[in-house]
Amino acid sequence: MAPALHASNSRCFPLHPRPNLERGTRNWELPEGWSGRTLAGLRTKLLNWFDAHQRDLPWRRDAAGQLTAPRDAYRVWVSEVMLQQTTVAAVVPYFERFMAALPNVRALAEADEQRVLKLWEGLGYYRRARHLHAAAKELVANHLPTSEKGGADADHQLPDDPVVWESLPGVGRYILGAVLSQAFDRSLPIVEANSLRVLARIFGYRKDPREGEGKVWVWGAAEAVLPQKRAGDFNQSLMELGALICTPTAPACDTCPVSANCIANRDSLQDVIPPKKKPVAITEVAEVGVVIRDGDRLLLCQRPADAGRWQNMWEVPHAPRAEGEDVSTAAVRAAKELTGFDIEPGAELLTIKHGVTRYAITLVCLEATHTGGKFAPGPYADAKWVSPTDLADYPVSSPQRKLMTALADPKRQPRLF
DNA sequence: AAACCGGGGTT
DNA sequence: AACCCAGGTTT
């Protein structure tokens, strides 16, 4: 039984002990047609299916490649952070590389942030890496057992206390439940994209489980279906089913182990449960980046280290757009005004897409001898010269890497002036 | 509650 | 271009 947790700070979410379904102490109501008996059957079917069909994923093994129960907390943690908003296939190679470089929490805590970010390069959402790094430092500083208490591997032993995990940056209710259920066999629920879909379909929940009362409902469901034993594997089974069988479109209900229990399957509601996410409007932003080249050196501009986010390679001022002006045109126009040079449209145009924003960055490459023009170095106080070789050591996003590679190419001819 | 993360992959 | 993804944080 999980201990009752106190909500002593604003980041706390309610972590209830698992409700006793038979005593009816929960406030999550079983949908029509469901009973404690059918719920128990559902647990058994999912666990059996998971035992037979789970994928062989690296974080389900320890560093020596062995299947263990429970699993290695550090490996589970890192994998869960990488898997945020990121597909399994994309994560696997990054996970292997990360584990080889930083095999335990102490190694992570002692690593330079630049190295951590470098290992993260290409995964996106780089704040995850900064949070992971900061959390590792916090764990090593304050929450690792002493050698006497923890034995030989005490240096690398992560705590099993939900209160500690809940306080770590980048750890929300999902990662807390995922790590503690898998690594310490604690009965804590998880809700993410897969289990949300699976639970909504099985129990025929028609409203959006992502917002409002739906969020409360789906966490209640995840808690209600959770078995006392093997909670980690059960949580995994929900996600595995969502990934392999109960897919967003065209779920394979004919091979689903719990199709007989599923209300969405019974009523042919797979396509409307859960409802599609409402689309987000895209805001286009024109920005201008400036790189000055002097022979084989590049003058890059970085934001201050305390900017609160991953450092960018270049300052990219926003370019105000005229009414109805194309974002690319605006970027080129602003680049002309900023540098005083006649810039050919599209010479170096990078478009970065994000969920709600699309950035068009016109990257201007100038020879050093031309910096006496209108280009004002004011905003670029942190600029420094680097060699093309050094560029490879900078952790940047993939689109930026593409530009850096192009800029560092000695065969590349200046496209301006 | 909604926006943000100046992501990435698949279709 | 739309949609999805083993979310968390900030406003």
Image (spheres, coloured by chain):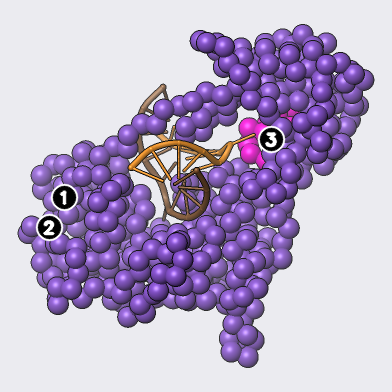
Chain colours: A purple, B orange, C brown
First in sequence, mark 2 or 3: give its number. 2
Query: Circles 1 and 2: CB distance less than 8 Å?
Result: yes
* A203 with respect to A166 (left or right): left
Q: Position of residue A242 (x, y in %)?
A: 31, 51
**Dot 1: within a 10 Å radius of its alpha carbon, few (fewer than 14), some, or many (20 or more) residues?**
many
Instruction: Give the numbered dot on residue A401.
Output: 3
Q: Secondary structure beneath disc 1?
A: loop
Three-letter amino acid code at disc 2? Pro
In this orientation, does residue A73 appear?
yes
Label 1 and label 3: CA atoms lie apart by: 46 Å
Mark 1 residue type? Gly
x, y percentage for residue A98?
62, 57
Which chain does tag 3 point to?
Answer: A
The magenta span reads A396-410
Q: Please, is residue A283 above or below residue A328 in the view?
A: below
Residue A358 part of the magenta-drawn span: no
Give the Cα separation between the discs numbered 2 and 3: 51 Å
Residue A384: image location, x then y, percent = 85, 38
Compare marks 1 and 3 and give the one earlier in the sequence. Answer: 1
The residue beneath circle 1 is: A204
Where residue A121 sits in the image (x, y, percent)?
A: 64, 45
Q: Are marks 1 and 3 in contact (CB under 8 Å)?
A: no
- Left or right: A374 with respect to A281? right
Q: Which residue is mark 2?
A: A31
Q: Residue at x 13, y 70 (%)?
A: A36
